[in-house]
Image (spheres, grey):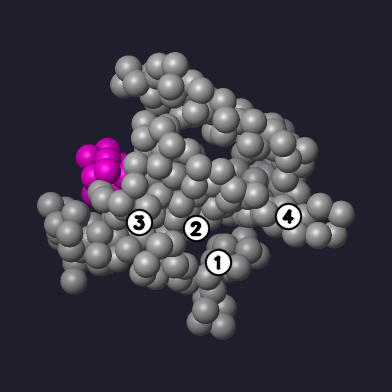
Amino acid sequence: MSSAHACETLMVEEVPFPLHVTATTKPLSLLGHGVTDVEIHFLHIKLTAIGVYLDPDVVSKHLQQWKGKGENELVDNDGFFEALVSAPTDVVIRVVVIKEIKGSQFGVQLESAVRDRLAAVDQYDEEEEEALEKVTQFFQSSNYLKKHSLISFTFPATASAAEITLTTMTEGKEVTKKMKVENENVAKMMKKWYLDGPNGVSYTTVVSLAHNLAALLSN
């Protein structure tokens, strides 16, 4: 469920996402949104809301091979999402907590998903293990990620690194901390966790991306 609000934001599960963010030099557009969720004893629990920001030029520069394809042809197309992940373009992924979670729990989920992806392509060595451990520790240092905590993953086009920004409320104050992920393989697989087509962490986000990118590819 989502709707435009005040023309400046899009509401995703009652979480406002700005329609544009600036990562490095130019504004990026909100081209995908969705949720992560889980079913427990027939209860449908939404965990996080997600917004994916891309430079719309990614379509004309890196995705023309899929011009004219519809949403249904793109949504389960591994090659399309691999091209999106690999494209040298700025990407920002904003994740807003809906259901409170332990920082350590979020860190372990991310670590496990990234490690499995790296191992599958034989890229999980000591350097990757070390970099991933730092990411896990970064999240573990926040005891709880309360509702409305914001996790931003920034992937600059010109760098092989990524930056994680975590904003939480502690004793009524907003606390922000950042870390750089210098390992290129780990950075790419973190991006892939969210943009890995049917294998990504949020299928609703993938469907939304396929819908919006198909529309841009039809122009």
- The amino acid type found where label 4 is placed reads Val
Which residue sits at x=44%, y=67%?
A: 22
Instruction: State the CA–CA distance, disc 1 to disc 4.
Output: 19 Å
- The secondary element bearing badge 2 is classed as strand
- The amino acid type found where label 1 is placed reads Phe
Query: Is 142 within the magenta?
Result: no
Instruction: Specify the quadrant that holds the N terminus.
Output: bottom right
Query: N-terminal of the two: label 3 or label 4?
Result: 3
Density class for disc 2 (Cα within 10 Å; few <14, some 14-19, many ≥20) is many
For discs 2 and 4, the disc positioned in front in the rendered view: 4
Residue 61: image x %, image y %? 17, 59
* Residue indicated by mark 3: 90
- The amino acid type found where label 3 is placed reads Asp
Query: N-terminal of the two: label 3 or label 1?
Result: 1
* Residue indicated by mark 2: 51
* Residue indicated by mark 4: 175
Query: N-terminal of the two: label 2 or label 1?
Result: 1
Query: N-terminal of the two: label 1 or label 4?
Result: 1
Which region shows up in magenta? 72-86
Which residue sits at x=25%, y=49%?
A: 87
Density class for disc 3 (Cα within 10 Å; few <14, some 14-19, many ≥20) is many
* Residue indicated by mark 1: 17
Instruction: State the CA–CA distance, disc 3 to disc 4.
Output: 25 Å
For discs 1 and 4, the disc positioned in front in the rendered view: 4
Query: Is 78 within the magenta?
Result: yes
Which residue sits at x=36%, y=35%?
A: 184
Query: N-terminal of the two: label 2 or label 3?
Result: 2
One can see residue 40 in this view:
no
| Total marks placed | 4
